[in-house]
Amino acid sequence: MTESQQHTGSYYAASRNQLTEYPQLQGDQTADVCVVGAGFTGVSTALHLEERGYKVSLVEANRVGWGASGRNGGQMIGGLSGESAIAKALGAEGEKALWDMRWAGHKIIRDRVATYNIDCDLKTGYLDVAIKPRHIKDLHEELEMLEKYQFPHEFRMLSREETQDTTGTKAYIGAMLNMGNGHLHPLNLCAGEAAAAASLGATIYEQSPVLRIERGSKAKVVTEQGAVTADFVVLAGNAYHFLEPKLRGIMFPVNSFIIASEPLSPELVNQINPRDLAICDPNYILEYFRLSADKRLLFGRRFTYFGSDPEVIKRNLIPHVLKKYPQLATTKFDFGWGGTIGVPINRVPQMGRLAPNIIYSQGYSGHGVNVTHLAGQIMADTVAGTLERFDIFAGIKPLTIPGQHLFRNQMVALGMIYYKLIDRL
Ligand SMILES: Cc1cc2nc3c(=O)[nH]c(=O)nc-3n(C[C@H](O)[C@H](O)[C@H](O)COP(=O)(O)OP(=O)(O)OC[C@H]3O[C@@H](n4cnc5c(N)ncnc54)[C@H](O)[C@@H]3O)c2cc1C
């Protein structure tokens, strides 16, 4: 794929603060660091590097936030996917380091929203809901860790009754409230961070698919009409990456879809989410939902579909909403869209090097809002020569999926079947 696209027809694109209009890359340019891909990973990396005084070019095939970063559920959830594998790699003495990494992205987001005055509807409050008794056990384990490390925000288990009052549905048997997590408008956050990077001197190019990278002591990032020659290149294309087949072959692309209702009446809001929390269930084929700033229900779920027709997406998701909330039977759903998530087999986010001066970060599964922000910092640290956290991820060998880049749709389907099976266990 090399043809540039505009934003998908999401609620976020329809309610964004401003249309980003950065120029196409043209002619021969130079930079200290060239970042490819302007989702959270790329934008976050660019902003960290600009804050450290590097001259950065950020080259995006489509629009800033066009990929998963501008389409996601907006749930700011602590933790990393693949934590058990990371814990094993780090050993007992690494437990605290891992714990700190779980929340590092939140702090970066909060600091940036405050420092750069980013208007992205950032709210606190998250409910991890339980469907089965074993989920309650998992929540208790999480609670013990929060207690052990004296988590500085309110957290507590909710009884079945309190969960049902807080979610307006009998679908869940308990929950853990965590006021350290939250939710936000992801496209406005991504665009706001890009604007912050540009204000510090970053040069951003949109509608500029990178076609190849010429390797050498300086690397040359080439698009149809121009090129950036840089000391360092950071690849941040994640599941939308169409440049280096090697990077696509180590992740499953998993599609997830979201529908947005019309704004709900205060009565309905009070019934289904009176505390304005982000809510997420623990299944692999999970359901995640929350209210937007203008009180729409944003409801997300995966299903096997490769298109982007909003009517198909609504038809598939609305029955799942009505199962929980029959009172929304006459509610209109205004938007339906989807996006692709990069899911490594062992679920551990992937960071590595393709050449001494070309590094990448990808594969955060459903935890990207938080972890991309940490990843950006790690990429910037790596460029600056402070490598410790990069080495943690780079040391965990990714499992390769044979032929993945040749059979994208089949691989998406296979991924869905695999994770559905896990949910049944
Ligand atoms: C529907 C959905 C719901 C989700 N919900 C949540 C959630 O609630 N909470 C959460 O934490 N995570 C969630 N996620 C995951 C999260 O959105 C991602 O992990 C995160 O946004 C990944 O960010 P990224 O910058 O690495 O990739 P992306 O945002 O996908 O950005 C990659 C960018 O690279 C560009 N690119 C690729 N190749 C090239 C090239 N050759 N040249 C130039 N540019 C290129 C693409 O155009 C794209 O803009 C969700 C994802 C989806 C799809």
Image (cartoon, rainbow, N blue to C red):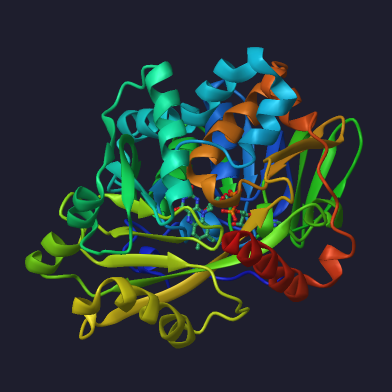
| Image quarter (top left, top right, bottom left or bottom right) of the N terminus | bottom right
Q: Which residue is rendered at x = 82% and y = 43% of the image? A: 220
Foreground residue among 233 and 218: 233
In the image: residue 380, left or right of residue 387: left
Asked if residue 160 lies left or right of residue 230, the reply is left
Tell me what residue is drawn at x 70 percent, y 35 percent: 85
Q: Position of residue 66 (x, y in %)?
A: 53, 61
Q: Nearer the viewer, residue 240 or 138?
A: 138
How many labels sit on residues?
Answer: 0
In the rendered image, the quadrant that contains the C terminus is bottom right
Quadrant containing ligand 1 reads bottom right
Residue 71 to residue 275: above or below: below
| Residue 243 image point, x, y percent | 79, 57
- Judged left or right of residue 28, residue 119 is left
Between residues 248 and 66, which one lies in front from this camera angle?
A: 248
Q: Nearer the viewer, residue 241 or 27?
A: 241
Does residue 1 appear anywhere in the picture? no
Is residue 119 visible in this depiction of the protein?
A: yes
Q: Find the residue positioned furthest to the top.
A: 93
- The image position of residue 370, as x and y in percent, is 48, 39
Residue 257, position as x, y percentages in the image = 49, 70
Left or right? Give the position of 246 relative to 162.
Answer: right
> Among all residues in the image, which is located at the extreme front?
133
Write the residue at 58% across / 71% down.
5
Vertical side of 211 occupied by 202: above or below: above
Residue found at x 51% / y 36%: 79
